[in-house]
């Protein structure tokens, strides 16, 4: 009995991987959405700079700090969009089919995904960068009020450097 339904069952199981299309397209559309929102934010950030030269020193300093924070936030948004794009392409390559143009000579190997661990490593590196950018975005407005807060700030920067070093070391080991 099982021998008669086994081929049908195996075909069904193999084709069930196509449910990953839901995640591929959802991730791709999310990436487009995040890129769009971030591009709009960049446009409005730059539009506020039109009369920068006419501001007083205090107003310029305030606008500069806000602009730097918005630019750092924009980097964060573009990195998040990149994560979603890498995730979408990686899922497609791993579960559906190889993307032929990605494997042609002369194309960047940045988006080349050959295993689930490879996808996970690429995503982890971008997530680390997002966390670093988020820390920088918050640190712009940080004004340490005592030596202990300054020490914590220095320790946080040291830990970020260590995370970058370890992720770079792990990448070069492969």
Image (spheres, helix red, strand yellow):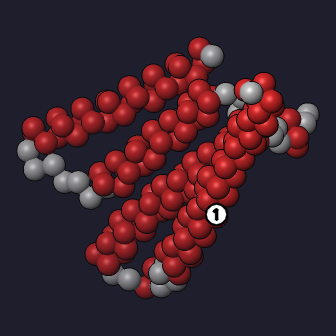
Of 34 and 22, the residue lying toward us: 22
Q: Quadrant of the N terminus?
A: top right
Q: Quadrant of the C terminus?
A: top right
Residue drawn at x 86%, y 35% as measured from the top left: 103
The answer to whether residue 41 is seen in the rendering is yes
Q: Quadrant of residue 156?
A: top left
Among all residues in the image, which is located at the extreme top? 173
Which residue is identified by label 1? 29
Residue drawn at x 56%, y 75% as measured from the top left: 40
Among all residues in the image, which is located at the extreme right? 105
The answer to whether residue 106 is seen in the rendering is no
Compared with residue 25, is residue 86 higher up or lower down, i.e. above or below? Answer: above
Q: How many residues crowd mark 1 within 10 Å: few (<14), some (14–19), many (20+)?
A: some
Image position of 20 (left or right of 98):
left
Image coordinates of residue 33 in percent, x first then y, are 59, 67
Of 117 and 69, the residue lying toward us: 117
Image coordinates of residue 32 in percent, x first then y, are 64, 64
Compared with residue 142, is residue 107 higher up or lower down, i.e. above or below? Answer: above
Compared with residue 131, is residue 166 higher up or lower down, i.e. above or below? Answer: above
Image position of 76 (left or right of 108):
left
Q: What SS does tag 1 mark?
A: helix
Image position of 37 (left or right of 147):
right
* Count of number-bearing discs: 1
Compared with residue 48, is residue 134 higher up or lower down, i.e. above or below? Answer: above
Image coordinates of residue 65 in percent, x first then y, are 35, 65
Of 127 and 118, the residue lying toward us: 118
Among all residues in the image, which is located at the extreme front? 1
Q: Quadrant of residue 149?
A: top left
Of 94 and 129, the residue lying toward us: 94
Image coordinates of residue 137 in percent, x first then y, are 36, 55
């Amino acid at each position: 009995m099982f021998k008669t339904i086994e081929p049908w069952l195996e075909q069904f199981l193999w084709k069930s991987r196509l449910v990953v299309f839901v995640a591929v397209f959802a991730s791709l559309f999310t990436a487009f959405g995040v890129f769009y929102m971030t591009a709009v934010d960049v446009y409005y950030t730059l539009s506020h700079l039109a009369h920068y030269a006419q501001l007083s020193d205090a107003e310029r300093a305030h606008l500069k700090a806000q602009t730097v924070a918005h630019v750092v936030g924009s980097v964060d948004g573009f990195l998040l969009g990149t994560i979603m794009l890498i995730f979408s392409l990686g899922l497609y390559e791993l579960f559906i089919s190889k993307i032929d143009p990605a494997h042609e000579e002369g194309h960047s190997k940045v988006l080349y995904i050959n295993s689930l661990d490879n996808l996970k490593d690429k995503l982890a590196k971008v997530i680390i960068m997002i966390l670093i950018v988020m820390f920088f975005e918050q640190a712009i407005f940080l004004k340490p009020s005592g030596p202990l807060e300054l020490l914590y700030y220095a320790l946080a920067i040291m830990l970020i450097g260590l995370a970058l070093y370890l992720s770079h070391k792990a990448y070069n080991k492969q």
